[in-house]
Amino acid sequence: MADLRLVLVTPEKTLFDKPVASIKVPMFDGSAGIYPGRAPLVGRLGVGELTLKGGDGASDSYFIEGGFIQIKGEQVSVLTNAATPAEKISRTAAAEELAAAKAEKATTDDAMEAVANKIDRARKLVKMATAE
Amino acid sequence: MANARLLVKRLKSVRNIRKITRTMELIATSRFKRAMDRATEAAEYTKKISEIVGDLGAADLKFSHPLLEERPETKKSVLLVLTSNRGLCGGYNGAVLRNTLKHIEQLKADEIDFSLEVSGKRGIKFLNFQKIDIDSSYTHFEDSPTFAEVDELGSRYVDDYIAGRIDRLDVAYTSFQTISRQSAVVESILPLSSLSSGSDGESAAGADGTDYEFQPSPQEILEEIVPAAFRAKLFKCFLDAAVSEQIARMVAMKGATENADEMAGDLKQQYNRARQAGITSELAEIIGGAAALE
C-alpha cells in the first residue's frame, strides 16, 4: 500500500508534515475521507474538524477554518487560514462563542447567512472542545 | 590635570553607551532570527498557493476575478505605510518615509483621492510633523505580526475593492531581498498583478500534467484562492518589514558599537597623554624650584 503524507500549512507556519495512514477533512459541502492511492484532487475546504490517523493507529484532530486541499500522488497539502489542535480548544470559550452567535440578530439576507455560518462554526467548536 | 578628569568622565560615558548599543545589537540579532524563521515558514504557504494556481492554470480556465481586474480609472486609492514602533534602526524608517512622501506628491499631481494608513509610531510621528493627515493608524504590529491581525486589514481591503470603494492599494514598506540587501519600496498590491508571489516560472511548477479532479469547480476554487493569495501577499509585506527592521537595527547598533570602541580608544590615548603631560610639567616645576633654591 502506498503511503500518505499530510502537510498542514497556515500562513504563519507549517503545523504538520508527517506520514499518516488516513485523513478526514471537512470539504465545503461535507466531510471527505482520504486513503492512500486517491486520485489527484484540488478542492475547497470548509470549517470543521480535520482528523488524521497515524500509522500506529493514534489519531489527532485539528479545527481548521476554510482553505484548500491539494492531493497529488502520496502528498496531501492542506492550506488553511488557521488550525487549532483539538486539545487547545477551550470548552467555555466555545460555549461563549455559540451563545454570542445565537444572540446576534440579522436583518438582511447576507447578515442571516453570516450569522448562520457563525453558529455553525461555534457548534463545531463546541463539539470538538476538550480543554477547559 | 583638570583636562584629564574631564576625559575620564567622557570615557566612562562612552563605555556605558557602548554597553547599551552592544546589548541592543544582540537583542536585534535574536529577534531577527525569530522573524526570519517566521518569514520562511510563511513562504511555504505562498509557495503552495502558487502551486494550486498553477494546477488551476492547467485546467485551461480564464483567470478573471474582481481582484485581478485593473480599473480603467483610479479615483480612490489607499496608501499603507509600514514603519517601526521603535527608533534606533538607522535609515530604516527614513527610507520608507522618503518614498512615502514622494508617492504622496505623485498621487496629488495625478489628482487621485487617497487615504493614508500608517503602521508604526515612527511613521505616525513623522507624518504628523509634516502636517499630513493620517486616516487611520496602527501601533499594534510589533516585530512578530500575526496573520489574524493582518487578515483584519486584508479582509477590509478586499471588501472595499470589490465594492468599488477603492481602486488601488499601495504599500510602502521595506522589502527583504537577502540578509545583506533590503530596499524601501512602494508596491501596488491591489489590483493583484500576478497570482504567483515569486517569479513567473514558479507558478508553472505546479502544472506538471497531473490530471486533477476539482471540487467544486476550478472557477469556484479560483474565486476563493485569489483573496487568499492577496492576504498572503499582504502578510508577506508585514513580515518583510519586520525582518528588515531587525536587520537595520542590528547593522545600526553594530556600527554604533564600533564607533564607541574607536572613540573609547581615542579618549584613552588622549587621557594618557594628558596624564603624562601633567607628570612632566610637575617634574619640570620641581626641578625648576630646586634649581631656584641653589
Image: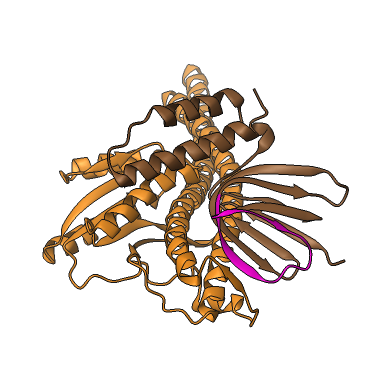
Chain colours: A brown, B orange
As for residue B255 lying within the magenta part, the answer is no
Q: Nearer the viewer, residue A101 or B223?
A: A101
Relative to B165, residue B261 above or below: above
**Quarter in which the N terminus of chain B is drawn:** top left
**Residue B109 placement: quadrant:** bottom left
At a point 41% along the width and 49% down the height, the residue shown is B90
**Residue B44 placement: quadrant:** bottom right
As for residue A45 lying within the magenta part, the answer is yes
Is residue A17 among what the camera can see? Answer: no
Q: Nearer the viewer, residue B231 or B130?
A: B231
Q: Nearer the viewer, residue A120 or A8?
A: A120
Relative to B271, residue A6 above or below: below
Report the span colored magenta. A29-46
Q: Nearer the viewer, residue B100 or B224?
A: B224
Residue B127 position, x and y percent, is 23, 45
Q: Provide the major secondary structure of the magenta segment.
A: strand
Relative to A104, residue B25 above or below: below
At a point 61% along the width and 27% down the height, the residue shown is A90
At a point 46% along the width and 66% down the height, the residue shown is B220
Residue B42 position, x and y percent, is 56, 55
Residue B128 position, x and y percent, is 20, 40
At a point 43% along the width and 27% down the height, the residue shown is A100
Residue B168 position, x and y percent, is 26, 62
